Image: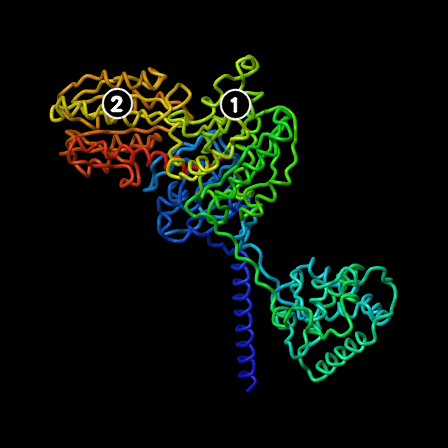
Amino acid sequence: MRATVIAAFFGVFLTCTYTAKEATKKTKKAKLYVPQIDCDVKAGKIINPEFIAKCPPGCQDVKHRVYGTDIYASFSSVCNAAIHSGIIDNTGGKVLVQKVAGHSGYRGSFSNGVRSLSLPRWRESFLVSEGKPRKGVTYPSTLEYSSSKSTAVKSEPKKPEQDLKGTKSADTANTSEKASDQGDTARKEHRTTPGPTPATEMATTTPTPTTTTTEPSTTVPQPTTTPAAPRTTAAPAKARPGLHRGRDMGSSSVHPAYASVVAAAARQVQAAQGRGQNTGAQHQEPVATFQRAASSPIHLAMEIDSWKPGLSLFDTGFTSKEELNPKPLEPISQGNQNCKVDLSFLMDGSWSIGKRRFQLQKRFLGNVAQALGIGSAGPLMGIVQYGDDPSTEFNLKTYANSKDLRNAIEKIQQKGGLSNVGKALSFVNKNFFLDANGNRGGAPNVVVVMVDGWPTDRVEEASRLARESGINIFFVTVEAAAQSEKQNVIEPNFVDKAVCRTSGFYSINVPSWFSLHKVVQPLVKRVCDTERLACSKTCLNAADIGFVIDGSSSVGTGNFRTVLQFVANISKEFEISDTDTRIGAVQYTYEQRLEFSFDKYSTKQDVLNAIKRISYWSGGTSTGAAISYASEQLFSKSKPNKRKIMIVITDGRSYDDVSMPAMAAHQNGVIAYSVGVAWAAPDELEAIASDPAKEHSFFVDDFDNLYHYVNQLIQNICTEFNSQPRN
């Protein structure tokens, strides 16, 4: 028997020990919990400087963009960057992320099935490595996000004194305590002064937006329980000015009939409370509302003196239904959904414009806001006023409808000073189009510059940098310099230097401020041409474009001239100069020939003339060798801040391999497009093209149909540029 007891005791002891060990293990595992992130989460959205996260399967997708190689811009998808670097594959896994400083350039490459893009510069970078904790480093079990999507904040267990709507913050609690204290004082006044009594009843019928600690049923009483409420609430709206003139607010002399009505209503409320009915005259909200009403002597005067002998409680012109059911909030304006742009107006506030013309400018901006149809799903508009220095009057997210925007514009006061437009453009480029200011990312960024006369500083460099970062710039110039004033203009032809100069689409000149109203609709139409805006990127100093042209015997002389026209049609859509887009060309057969390099011609006309002069060579088709030659002779000499774009045009299958030379070009940051004609091989076109191949390869059955792809090719180039983030 004794042995049995000892054995049983020993068994229980072992069981308890095992259970304790298991509990300890579980506790340790909880400390090492790794949070999971989605495929589209960018490193920059996570505040933690170093963290381990788990990526789900299926993140290898072109929509989860990656910028850089080895070191990635923080605008990149964490999980797809980890796949690109080889840390994980498309099945997912744990990744260690370390934030580092921003870089002046990120090199795009193709690695592990992921195409990363090049980026000139970015403010923050990150490294990815195997998801194992470093010694001595504590990693968060929840990640802290910089946006409203944060999952790091966990609700505390709900305390008994908190209401059913959710956890109350410390600030709300403090406010409620103060309201309660003030409410006690208000109740004391209520006992000694008959005047505030109607305000108390009003509190039972009018919901207070700032109070969040009561259920809806406690803020909207039923008509049957508070018959006095509609009359007392509606009284301020129906107050008659002549009735309370000369009344003493401190007096307690109230008409007997009025006092008896109030007393009767109070008795009904108390009786209902005694029966357990919900009158709406309880919890904290009525106290807070009563306190606010009691703080306004004028409000109390209106409450007391709007009563008139002979009036019943419902003779005020409002029904109980109207009072007990406040008007619903107006729906948020969606705006003109066919014009989704993020728009900044640079408003001229210099002294040269004068007060009268400044008012005309405000009227013009208000009319533009009205014509645009401002709304959350349409255009958003902010205003920066410039003089000596620029300042933001309001940003994109301040106003979400045209009416409020127009009212805000009317209140703008003139700054004065010089007309420093260049300084204002630099300010907008760096400070205005930020996520925190309401920038939506997917909407084109547009700046409209209002100029009275001419700028007092230089605009070309500031405009170029703004365009380079993806901003579409319009100039509206009014009353240009007279002949006698032209010697005062610092930068002649400043408009041509500031905007995309391909068609005059981005500039409007108005002879007088009094005729400014005539350009409202033309400007709105241009600003809302989102397809055109996407392609304004063609005028930026963003690319070195190299054409690799098939000159083999199968092409023929006539078709070769058609190919050259195709090349010219694409080239002329870009702003060409040494600091803007540059064009180069290679012709190939079995051999290769450099027709002209990127630095050969610096004007559009010179480039177009050089394209016309290319002579047809004739021979075999070695496309792979031509791609390698173009990589060495053209793109190796490309400028670091330029996007490198190769457009290969061929009419047949290559005699050599194209996949390895193309892959080498991709890894060196070249974005390759393939255009096949007639007998071109589809598999080779896809091998030449950058990922995704569908967006980078084209095929036509006849040379005469090449022109169909001019606009689509340019649009793809523009869209690809537009998808890059702004620093």
Amino acid at pointer 2 = Tyr
Amino acid at pointer 1 = Val
**Residue 419: horizontal and vertical position, in percent?**
59, 24
The image's mark for residue 716 is none
Q: In which quarter of the image is residue 263?
A: bottom right
In the image shown, does 524 or 124 lie closer to the viewer?
Answer: 524
Q: How much space separates mark 1 and mark 2, taking CA atoms? A: 40 Å
Quadrant showing the N terminus? bottom right
Mark in front: 1 vs 2: 1
Is 112 positioned to the left or the right of 454 in the image? left
- Whether residue 43 is visible here, answered yes or no, is no
Can you say whether 624 is above or below 83 in the image? Answer: above
Q: Name the residue under label 1.
A: 459
In the image shown, does 200 or 157 lie closer to the viewer?
Answer: 200
Q: Which residue is drawn at 29% across and 32% down?
A: 672
Q: Is mark 1 on a helix, strand or loop?
A: loop
**Total marks drawn?**
2
Dot 1 or dot 2, earlier in sequence: 1
Q: Name the residue under label 2.
A: 629
**Residue 132: horizontal and vertical position, in percent?**
47, 48
Is 506 positioned to the left or the right of 653 in the image? right
In the image shown, does 543 or 507 lie closer to the viewer?
Answer: 507
**Residue 343: horizontal and vertical position, in percent?**
50, 39
